[in-house]
Image: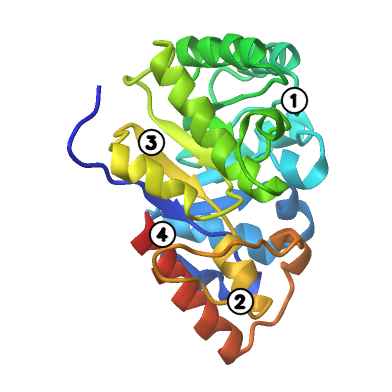
Amino acid sequence: MYIVSMTVKIAHEAPIGILEKVDKLTDYCYALVHLFETHPEYYNFFYNARHKLHRDVLLDNSIFELGAAFDEDKYAYWIEKLQPSFYVLPDVLENGEETIQNFINFASNHTRLPGVKIGTVQGKTYAELVDCYEFMSASADMIAISFDLSYYQGTGIGVNRLQRQCDGRIRLIKNLIADGVWNYNKPHHLLGCSLAKEFKFYRERCIHNIHSIDTSNPVVAGIKGYLYNNTHGLEIKPSQKLVEMIDHTVSDEEFARIEYNINCFRNIL
């Protein structure tokens, strides 16, 4: 089932010094929980965004940055304190079975946390990804799909890792739809991106229940000196993670590139 239009909410992670500027260019806020413990000003920004400006805030468990989900009890503490609009439950990279068990344990141990529960699809094979997807479809309020599953390297088409990631997530979603697995009654969140051109596919197909995406791609690229092609993005991706730049002082020249890239990203979408 396709409909004629879709509106996807966009968030871009950014260094602390330009969070306020970038927030004005995005649709909601995206926060990494592990930075709350080391950067009080980072937490304060998202608290104020949520409770004073009444912005939606999505809180992530920082698995991409840490390699493993943030400590369960500490995570629950920060969810209770921040009261985000959405939060990603603890998952396990590339492991659907353990991700399902983590979801069950966390949801059972913390039954009164505020916010929409996001369950991430994990796995190494299509069958494992489908099993995890079907569980999240039945149990989570929103379903998340990551940009960098190793599964994409064997299914995506392209001459390099980035192109295969880009094409791989598209193919996974196409297969879930073709096989009748995709749940049109649940909102979906796309975690990160390799190449911005990926999102053209979802716009052109009007997959209406892709609710939101997050990516630091336009920001990191701008800091590193890269400008987007207005309708395509980039064919490369700076290897540095935004979290490694969280304290970076952004120059006026860098921010001009960032703002340009963000506007291009929205045009692509």
Quarter of the figure with residue 239: bottom right
- Residue marked by disc 2: 226
Q: Position of residue 180 (x, y in %)?
A: 39, 10
Q: Which of the pair 21/153 is nearer the observer?
A: 153
Secondary structure type for disc 2? loop
> Which quadrant: the N terminus?
top left
Q: Nearer the viewer, mark 2 or mark 4?
A: 2
* Amino acid at circle 2: Tyr
Image marks 3 and 4: residues in contact by CB distance under 8 Å: no
Q: Residue at x 53, y 81 (%)?
A: 257
Residue projecting furthest to the right: 67
Whole-percent x, y for residue 206 in the image: 28, 38
Q: Is residue 56 in view from this perspective?
A: no
166 or 34, nearer to the observer: 166
Secondary element at image label 1: loop
Nearer mark to the viewer, of 1 and 4: 1
User: Which residue is under mark 3?
Assistant: 210
Along the line of sight, the residue nearer the viewer: 142 or 40: 142
Q: Is residue 229 left or right of residue 54?
A: right
Place residue 85 in its image quadrant.
top left
Which residue lies under the disc numbered 1? 94
- How many other residues sit within 10 Å of disc 4, few (<14), some (14-19) or many (≥20)? few
Q: Residue furthest front?
A: 159
Above or below — where is 144 with respect to 59?
above
Label 2 and label 3: CA atoms lie apart by 28 Å
Q: Earlier in the sequence, mark 3 or mark 4?
A: 4
| Crowding near the residue tagged with mark 1, few <14, some 14–19, many ≥20 C-alpha atoms within 10 Å | some
Mark 3 or mark 1, earlier in chain:
1
**Kind of residue at disc 3:** Ile
Q: Secondary structure at mark 3?
A: strand
